[in-house]
Image (cartoon, rainbow, N blue to C red):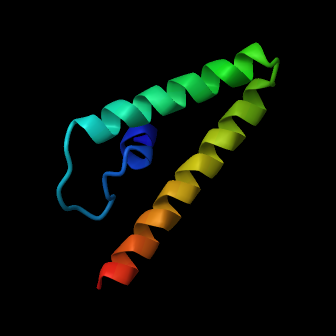
Amino acid sequence: ITAVVIGGISLFGGRGSILGPLFGALIVGVFTLGLRIAGADTQWTYLLIGILIIGAVAVDQWIRKVSG
């Protein structure tokens, strides 16, 4: 679900391509690996991924509101 949301697929339905979730998974994987290499605790990693999800949903809502 994280990769799909970050990849730009709306949780409220609509269209999308396979490339969005693919890049979303890549972003989440690189982000998680970077945090682990930096020595971040697992809890911080989950917290920051949660913040990424909230941000992606907020941007999706904003885009839906602006586009009418």
Q: Is residue 66 above or below residue 13?
A: below
Q: Is residue 28 above or below residue 55?
A: above
Residue in view at x 45 percent, y 41 percent: 2
Residue 48 appears at what percent x and percent y? 69, 41
Q: Is residue 21 above or below residue 57?
A: above
Counting every numbered tag in the picture gives: 0
* Quarter of image, res 41: top right
Residue in view at x 19 percent, y 61 percent: 14
Q: Is residue 66 above or below residue 18?
A: below
Residue 10 appears at what percent x and percent y? 32, 58
| Quadrant where the N terminus is found in the figure | top left
In the visual, does 52 lie left or right of 21?
A: right
| Quadrant where the C terminus is found in the figure | bottom left
In the visual, does 52 lie left or right of 17?
A: right
Residue 37 appears at what percent x and percent y? 74, 14
Task: From the viewer's side, name the closer residue of 52 and 12.
Answer: 52
Residue in view at x 76 percent, y 32 percent: 43
Q: Residue furthest top?
A: 37
Residue 4 appears at what percent x and percent y? 36, 42
* Quarter of image, res 67: bottom left
